[in-house]
Image (spheres, coloured by chain):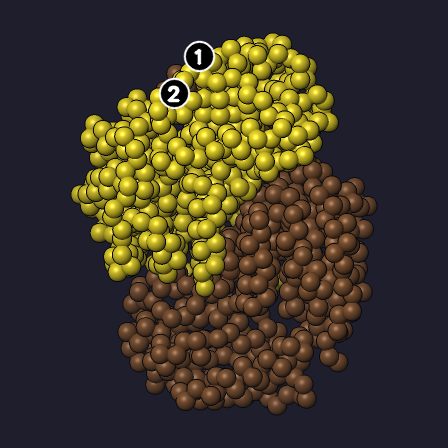
Chain colours: A brown, B yellow
Amino acid sequence: MTSTTQTTTTTAEELDALAQAAAAAAPVWRGADAATRASWLRAAADALDAHIDELVAIADDETRLGETRLRGEVARTTGQLRLFATVVEEGSYLELTVDDADPSATPPRPELRRTLTGVGPVAVFSASNFPFAFSVAGGDTASALAAGNPVIVKAHSGHPRLSERTAAIVAAALADAGAPEGSLALVEGREAGNALVQHPVIQAAGFTGSLGGGRALFDLATGRPDPIPFYGELGSLNPVVITAAAVATRGEALAQGLVGSFTLGVGQFCTKPGVVFVPEGAGFEELVAGFATGVGGGPLLTDRITEAFPSGIEHLEADPSVNVVAHGLPAEAGAAQPVVLSTDAASVAARPSTLLEECFGPVTLLVRYGSAEELQAALEVVPGSLTATLHSEPGDDVASVLALLERRAGRVLFAGWPTGVAVTWSQHHGGPWPATTSLHTSVGATAIRRFLRPVTYQDAPEALLPEVLRDPALSRLPHRRNGVLQLP
Amino acid sequence: MTSTTQTTTTTAEELDALAQAAAAAAPVWRGADAATRASWLRAAADALDAHIDELVAIADDETRLGETRLRGEVARTTGQLRLFATVVEEGSYLELTVDDADPSATPPRPELRRTLTGVGPVAVFSASNFPFAFSVAGGDTASALAAGNPVIVKAHSGHPRLSERTAAIVAAALADAGAPEGSLALVEGREAGNALVQHPVIQAAGFTGSLGGGRALFDLATGRPDPIPFYGELGSLNPVVITAAAVATRGEALAQGLVGSFTLGVGQFCTKPGVVFVPEGAGFEELVAGFATGVGGGPLLTDRITEAFPSGIEHLEADPSVNVVAHGLPAEAGAAQPVVLSTDAASVAARPSTLLEECFGPVTLLVRYGSAEELQAALEVVPGSLTATLHSEPGDDVASVLALLERRAGRVLFAGWPTGVAVTWSQHHGGPWPATTSLHTSVGATAIRRFLRPVTYQDAPEALLPEVLRDPALSRLPHRRNGVLQLP
């Protein structure tokens, strides 16, 4: 089957009504105490778990990602909601900070108490490739709700029925748990998405998708009369560097791991290793070919991705330096066949815009380097990425390569492959443009900070302070007082 | 004397050379350990202190702000540099976070270690009204250097000689202390400023100035092929709300305080109370008039501000609702005479774009309100501000007013006046557009976070980790491990 054509479009009047409902819900979310807000997040997670069979069936029908992957993705999604419930309860995210008054200072210093609070209603643009974890109830939504903000999601046209059903289930669960009307809403259609990011009620936006679509929305968000932060994840090549010593020590395992990673999810992860720097003459291409010829492809997510894949390959193959290393197993009609291409570092350095364009789907480009200088010159033109991977051995001198990779990516791996993204406190899923539009992240506990703003209270009577800034609450929460961090 | 006309202009070639030097210095700043980076910041502060007589003389000549104010501002500036040295040594700003590997998880979880690191060279646009504290070596520069980034400052045309001399003194002090060449540079001229924010080497920008100038630079920064964060502070009305009970209890003190605050620094602070909501019929206008008639004005900072002041007043007075409450003492030719105007809440709600435009200089607008509803309706149209002040008494029901003020400003005061900004850990100097362009702040310890980006290391051999992420360093620094905050 082909991807469903979207038929529903949210009108401007409908969007405005949803925005006003979100605006009305915002003070309730902001004002909800930690236990309440955490209970709402857990209610959303429980409801998704309770409807997993129904949701996975719709998702598989619309995305062709398969039941195993989709069940795992629901678990990740509910895990994210529950992680953020913990983050809210733990309280560090509030960055509570108190400076006591100092009348003896010159000039005399007032009392200052600082907390973070929700920015207001957030727009979330969902992704095609993660119909649960980066969609209606995904990481952007979970972190925005956790920060105390209602959310309006722009559904992805690749899975409209799933979006509607997920939104209905989560909205009902939130209402049953006592959250206000307007906590979570859905809009559909490209124009509604453009209007959403420009709506005066919306105070921030999260986006996962293509460079073109993301840039257009970024420009709308920053071009507003009152610009808002736009947290977009727009594309990533995820460079891998393999040293000669690593090939010599564990070439076969590396080749097998690479093939598994670039074909995982039919090559449609934003952390797919798209360009792999390999030592010339170490025989790594042959090792990769050995594994790649046995690997299967599959149907891609949408018609657009299905059409773009062969033309992306053709575009690469048109470069005189590019050779085919291997094809995977022949694919059924309309499905993508894995392919490994190769070129050399000098060509990459000379023609980065041709050779370093992200191509969604099961393809990776091996880049032979003959010297450290060649490798360095090619790495310098690799655009910002979510991840960079270095496979080296203890004897290798990798200092200068590592210094470059740290500047090019937000996560640097030294084992394994980038396609798994653990959702934890220390995860970072971001990187220099075009990986993301901002310094911060859409995965892991710190995603919450994108949807918070500071407010400092000067010389406030205790009765007028937010509860979390009064001394009794401070004694139960991590905070800084007069410059010193204090734990409960 | 009038403000100096700027004669020096940095050429594109000169800017490029400075940018390349900054790019070369960036890894040294990023890599410097806490003690070293702190020593560089303190060396800069010590050098400013050592040259205070010379610098204050130049500053007074160029800005007419007076020696007392300027000496105080140098102390604030060196205090900021020393505060950031402490912030660097304390180490929380790195947000060190470790999640240990969990091979039993599904899927198995790798080890992740996260730190923040400098973004790269930062552009700083200095302000006319704080020739030290928001200029060459001001808060943006101090926080950018503290984060491990070289800085290129765009000098303000209102104090070119002071900018050059400050830059020379600080650059020499940094060099003497062992910091690399390219740590701090200066560019001059509007075109150089526009080119600076678009230069590929520059990774973030800090700005303090006008809405028009800030918006233009914001658009350049976000319009780049690779957009960068632009942290601008663009203007602020700083609303004040006074209740009838407060007037009854301490009306005279409030009137005196207000007059002192709106005329402080000849009304040229970004936190000047520009609009004051006062209860109808409580006699507060008369109290203000009593103090205002005795207060003097003075020369304004630049020719542009001098010309804009009377036309801003005329613009307000042209509104039929506006009356003159009082004039201050007559001013000398070319200087500004303080003035207090008044209007009513209904007119503000009806014509916000006329009545709520920021006017730099010693003027404030009293807005009479007859009811809570009138006050609420007028507050709803007040644009985002750096501060909001509420003078009330314990019996007042201020919940809904306070809820509005918290949404409209980043600092809410309950005593005193907004024109003092303490530089501490819990300060926040920011607010919704147009107060600032971002969620974060240019004053106080958290200003550092604007110039940092996260990097997470997955399964890194200890020898390849940054020193701060290795276990021995973690035991000496605040960090989070497996979700639990830990203090040294």
Left or right, B183 with respect to B475, comes to: left
Pick the quarter of the image with the N terminus of chain B: top left
Q: How far apart are marks 1 and 2 (CA)?
A: 12 Å
> In this rendering, which labeled residue sits more in front, label 1 or label 2?
2
Front-most of A460 and A483? A460
Residue B221 percent across, percent down from the top left: 44, 55
Establish whether labels 1 and 2 are both on one chain.
yes
Quadrant location of residue B390?
Answer: top right
- What residue sits 41% from the left and 18% below the top? B330
For residue B294, the mark is: 1
Q: Residues within 10 Å of mark 1 (few under 14, many from 20)?
A: some
Which image quarter holds the C terminus of chain B?
Answer: top left
Do tag 1 and tag 2 residues touch (Cβ < 8 Å)? no
- Residue type at mark 2: give it: Ala
Residue at 59% in and 38% down:
B353
Q: What is the tally of numbered marks visible in this picture?
A: 2
Q: Seen in the image, is B394 located left or right of residue B11?
A: right
Residue B236, percent from left and from top: 51, 35
Check disc 2 and report the residue beneath it: B331
Could you say whether the residue bearing mark 1 is in a helix, strand or loop?
loop
Across and down, in percent, residue B108 comes to 57, 62
Which residue is at 63% across, 26% downward? B321
Task: Count neighbours of disc 2 (C-alpha within 10 A) and say few if under 14, some if 14 to 19, many if 20 or more.
Answer: some
Q: Residue furthest left?
A: B176
